[in-house]
Image: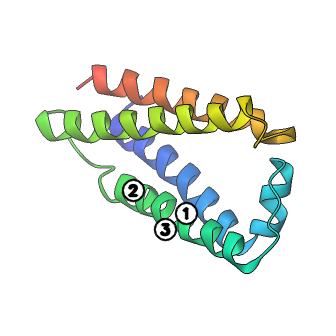
Amino acid sequence: MNNRIFLTIHSAIYVVFALALFFMPQTVWPMYGVELNDKYAFFLSQHTSIFLGGIGVISYQLRDIEVGQLAKKLFFALLISNIVGVVITLYAGITGIFTGFGWSDPAFFTLLSVMSYLQLKKQ
């Protein structure tokens, strides 16, 4: 897949999750077995959307990046970010923080990690 398609897909995924966690945290988190029981938990969900949205916007803005050193650095950064997502969400699943739909997050971040790695290798 070319850089433009990959980064557009990557961006869309992150922006959708950012918007969901910002506008509908009380709907999204219970699917993962996480309870939002006060205004602070609600705010932390919205705060998380800053970073998800930021990654989405960066991916979208750089979707026309050409093969080269800069592209390698971008895809390496996305790879590391997604691997951190695997580790954190896997921990949440193993320790029982995530239940129900929570199993999908480690799988989701693993898929994005593999896709980022494959894109990195093309650079």
Q: Mark 1 = which residue?
A: 48
Tell me if label 3 and label 1 are in contact, CB under 8 Å.
yes
Question: Disc number at residue 69?
Answer: none
Q: Which SS class for mark 3?
A: helix
Q: Count residues near mark 3 (Cα–Cα under 10 Å), then give few for <14, some for 14-19, many for 20+.
A: some
Residue at left offset 39%, top offset 21%: 118
Residue type, label 2:
Tyr
Check the picture and name the quadrant holding the C terminus.
Answer: top left
Check the image and name the residue furthest to the front. 95
Q: Mark 2 = which residue?
A: 60
Q: Which SS class for mark 1?
A: helix
Q: Count residues near mark 2 (Cα–Cα under 10 Å), then give few for <14, some for 14-19, many for 20+.
A: many
Mark 2 to mark 3 CA distance (whole Å): 15 Å
Residue type, label 1:
Thr
x and y, in percent, of residue 49 in the image: 55, 65
Residue at left offset 39%, top offset 56%: 60
Check the image and name the residue furthest to the left. 69
Residue type, label 3:
Ile
Whether residue 44 is situated above or below residue 90 in the rendered picture: below
Question: Disc number at residue 50?
Answer: 3
- Between disc 2 and disc 1, the foreground one is 1
Whether residue 81 is situated above or below residue 35 in the rendered picture: above
Q: Which SS class for mark 2?
A: helix
